Amino acid sequence: MSLALNGKPGVAPETRRRILEIAEQLNYRPNASARGLALQRTQTIGVIVPDISSPFYAELVRGVEQEASRQGFYLILATTLGKASREEKCFQLLGERRVDGILILTPRGDEELVQRIQGRGFPLVVVDRDIPSSDGVVEVIVDNFHGALSAVNHLLSLGRQRIAYINGIPELQASRDRLRGYKVALQEYGLELNPKQIVTGNFTLEGGYEAMKELLSSCPHVDSVFAASDSMAIGAIRAIREQGLRVPEDIAVVGFDDVPLAAQVDPPLTTVRQPIGEMGEIACRLLIQLIEGKVIPHRKVILQTQLVVRGSCGGGDAKGKTQSEKDGC
Amino acid sequence: MSLALNGKPGVAPETRRRILEIAEQLNYRPNASARGLALQRTQTIGVIVPDISSPFYAELVRGVEQEASRQGFYLILATTLGKASREEKCFQLLGERRVDGILILTPRGDEELVQRIQGRGFPLVVVDRDIPSSDGVVEVIVDNFHGALSAVNHLLSLGRQRIAYINGIPELQASRDRLRGYKVALQEYGLELNPKQIVTGNFTLEGGYEAMKELLSSCPHVDSVFAASDSMAIGAIRAIREQGLRVPEDIAVVGFDDVPLAAQVDPPLTTVRQPIGEMGEIACRLLIQLIEGKVIPHRKVILQTQLVVRGSCGGGDAKGKTQSEKDGC
DNA sequence: ATATATTATTAAACCGGTTTAGTGAGATTG
DNA sequence: CAATCTCACTAAACCGGTTTAATAATATAT
């Protein structure tokens, strides 16, 4: 019976046809619990995520879901709400469910939790994680350094030279990598680094707004700003306009992330796109490979960002202004 | 053993303690598949949703997840991507999983699918559904009519009288209800309805932009506009500004939904808030009640909207202008 | 002290699949 | 024609829980 339904050999064609017909007739659906029990395999992936309603994670989960469903896997969601206590609970729940593998999507990834999950023998892939991999955890991350580099290089290529940087939460590795990209781009161009041109927001719109106000008062002659997130970039634009300055004519702005909103603000935001959905897909694909016992060629996948040029930094029609006079900042 | 672990009576305290100790020691976790098989109950809720990455559905799912996890249920996601063919498949998958109940979150809800799910005896709650309930399906919806009413009344109270309406996709009941609210508000105020002041977008920013351009050319003297979604409202603002007009001084704008973006645009958007997360929570709570065989007092829960006043319609400082001259539109 | 009622522990049946072992019929071969 | 080998089908064991029935131990009553 099981043989016939699952298309395995050892069943006469006629018998198989008859079984399938009857199954169809009383529309039989196999019981996943029973199958899971017998097979010790649930075709389920557990996803640990801080908050499903944030656009970033929602898009990530969408990518995961797409790939999982394509390969016949299901998703079971566990949200931590950012609390470490819930992280432990999430793992327990997924463990009881005997999920075939676990996907952790969080930059605050608790190293200890990762250890324990691995210790219990669950296939595991970590996405967008902050912590440098200690042991052979499979991880999917984005190349923040080169992303920032390309953003600043773009501003430089447009002739901007007084480029400020609005950093995100400095504790996150992502912030540090982007900052490094900013610094290296300036250095390679032969520009001196001005510490006053580096301020810190907290990845929020308000944070970007405040940071930009601070920047405008301490360095009034900046001609462009690179923000470590689109939200902060949008906040910065608001601050710039309140000062009566124009974007991009007076100050060019580049963001990071390419959230859906970025294309819709005025002016449309030039930004560094993170391939969020693709990260989810790839992570899911890797996890399924792990589950199926295949060898993973590279345990660390680093995805490249892409610079999306829109209106907020002057685009192709920038005149390559030559503001060479020094200001005090 | 089972008795001891689940805290049921009929076990000596000493024995129970010993069992729990051993269980703890070799950290035993019950197998959810086995339990599901024996109990014919999986503690799982199947969620059918068009697309998890849309902010609206993401927030809805967040609400559902919160309530489910509070009551010890898990979520299993099934996305339709809007295709009816996948809708059927989703149901099959959830059926195999023997989910305890199903939540459908979609305005395009296929009536036939609802019938079949009910026919199979699955507890079912439908959220944000378009179709008027034929039989006793439990549904959670939002009061679009009164929401629109309050928005237009607000504009009227600010002295605006030439109020235009940008409708959403007319096939959706939500659009029709909002349109009705618009009409009734004007009628109750004693204003005549001008068909030219009603245009149609498709719920997108671009749609709102185009609709507003059309409106400005056919009815140049409108003093305010109510859009059936925030996205369209934001598109409308862009169109208004391109004409050299100011918001809210020349034209006041009110949206619908209160997406996160609404508070962040310039000027902050006055809008009608839908309690999205709460809808999810309530729907989930109702579903669990159904699952547990409790009686549902009301099979149709209609949630009220809330007018959120921000800058885009002049707010409290509106001067109550009296533009009584007629224009040709 | 014996019979009975009460309670705690142990054993077995069941949920619905998968898989292996066992059985019978038909084909092949000496 | 009998012995063997295939192949298709049937029966039984197993996955890991829950629940009911059977059994053992203890307490209560006569």
Image (cartoon, coloured by chain):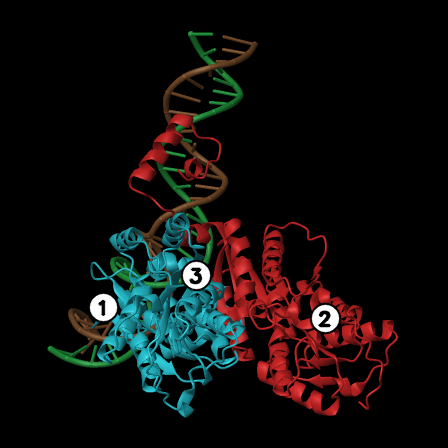
Chain colours: A red, B cyan, C brown, D green
Mark 1 or mark 3, whichever is nearer to me = 1
Q: Earlier in the sequence, mark 1 or mark 3?
A: 3
User: Where does the image place residue A68, in percent across and percent down from the top left?
Assistant: 53, 54
* Residue depicted at x 44% and y 37%: A3
Q: Read off the residue under disc 3.
A: B76
* Label 2 residue SS: loop
Q: Quadrant of the C terminus of chain A?
A: bottom right
Q: Read off the residue under disc 2.
A: A132
Q: Are marks 1 and 3 on the same chain?
A: yes
Q: Chain ID for label 3? A: B
* Residue depicted at x 35% and y 81%: B306
Asked if the residue at tag 3 contacts the one at tag 2, i.e. Cβ–Cβ closer than 8 Å, the answer is no
Task: Tell me which amino acid carries mark 2.
Answer: Pro
User: Alpha-carbon neighbours of circle 3 within 10 Å: few (<14), some, or many (≥20)?
Assistant: many
* Label 1 residue SS: loop
Between the C-alphas of marks 2 and 1, the distance is 52 Å
User: Where does the image place residue B9, in percent across and percent down from the top left?
Assistant: 31, 74
Q: Read off the residue under disc 1.
A: B299
| Displayed quadrant of residue B94 | bottom left
Task: Tell me which amino acid carries mark 3.
Answer: Ile
Residue B36 or B184: which is nearer the viewer?
Answer: B184
